Amino acid sequence: MTQQGGTGPEDLDALSSRELHDREVRRAVHHLDVAFLWRLLKELPAGEAAAGHPDHAAADAVKISSLIGDALDSGDPDVADSLRPLYLDYLREHGG
């Protein structure tokens, strides 16, 4: 029995790592699987280091840090206004 898209678990093993990457990212984006994409971002520096690219690992860590910093420091009035619905939904969902 094959999974969605006609590729069963045994067929996935035959794909190259690049093909697996492209497929999983495409699926995660399509399904808005932010938890998985976040996990991928967290694992990326370690993957770069394990592949022998410590300079890329450091750069990835800086980029991720920068994005997190932007998210935590998005108090700029124009940005805050555009994100207001997000803030309200989150606070209402979590009891203010």
Image: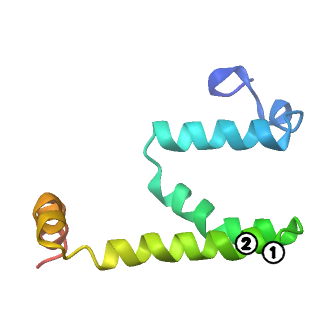
Coordinates of residue 38 in the picture (x, y in percent)? 52, 63
Which amino acid does the dot numbered 1 rest on? Pro
Residue 57 marker:
2
Coordinates of residue 44 in the picture (x, y in percent)? 68, 65
Rate crowding at label 1 as few (under 14), some (14 to 19) or many (20 or more) other CA atoms within 10 Å. Answer: some
The residue at the point 56 percent across, 38 percent down is: 27
Coordinates of residue 63 in the picture (x, y in percent)? 55, 70
Residue 40 marker:
none
Would you say 47 lies left or right of 32 here? right
Above/below status of 37 relative to 70: above
Element type at marker 1? helix
Would you say 96 lies left or right of 63 here? left
* Quarter of the view holding residue 88: bottom left
Q: Are marks 2 and 1 in contact (CB under 8 Å)?
A: yes
The residue at the point 32 percent across, 78 percent down is: 72
| Colouring used for the render | rainbow
Residue hosting label 1 = 54
